[in-house]
Image (tube, helix red, strand yellow):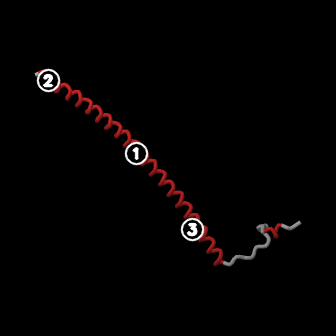
């Protein structure tokens, strides 16, 4: 049966060579940079979600506005047809 070290798993207290200060500093900086990047990515996603919500709200408002204007246009055209029809009838009678 193979021991745990042959599978690449070593206990934290065994098999570790001392880390020189330059390597420790490099790892620390890398960890800080990775943490900063992950936070920046989360913030960007949050900003994009907020922007998406605003754009969807604007789209919905514009759709409502368009529907109202189309209804108004249809009503005005209907009134124009009725008005034109009455004028034509009046002209024929006169």
Where residue 22 appears, as percent x and y from the top left, is 64, 78
Q: Residue at x 17, y 26 (%)?
A: 88
Q: Is residue 2 above or below residue 65?
A: below
Q: Which residue reaches farthest top?
A: 93
Q: Which residue reaches farthest front?
A: 92
Q: Classify the position of the N terminus by image quarter.
A: bottom right
Residue 59: image tag: 1
Image quadrant assignment for residue 16: bottom right
Asked whether 94 or 24 is in front, the reply is 94
Side (left or right) of 41 relative to 70: right
N-terminal-most mark, 2 or 1: 1
Element type at marker 3?
Answer: helix
Q: Residues within 10 Å of mark 2 (few under 14, many from 20)?
A: few
Q: Which residue is mark 2?
A: 92
N-terminal-most mark, 2 or 3: 3
Q: Confirm or deny contact between disc 3 and disc 1 (CB under 8 A).
A: no
Image quadrant assignment for residue 83: top left
Side (left or right) of 91 relative to 10: left
Q: CA distance from mark 2 to mark 1?
A: 49 Å
In this rendering, the label closer to the viewer, 3 or 1: 1
Asked whether 48 or 68 is in front, the reply is 68
Q: Which residue is mark 3?
A: 33
């Amino acid at each position: 049966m193979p021991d745990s070290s042959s599978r690449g798993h070593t206990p934290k207290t065994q098999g570790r060579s001392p880390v020189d200060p330059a390597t420790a500093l490099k790892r620390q900086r890398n960890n800080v940079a990775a943490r900063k990047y992950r936070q920046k990515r989360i913030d960007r996603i949050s900003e994009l979600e907020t922007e998406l919500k605003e754009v969807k709200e604007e789209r919905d408002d514009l759709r409502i506005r368009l529907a109202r204007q189309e209804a108004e246009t249809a009503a005005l055209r209907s009134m124009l047809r009725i008005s034109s029809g009455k004028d034509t009838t009046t002209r024929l009678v006169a």
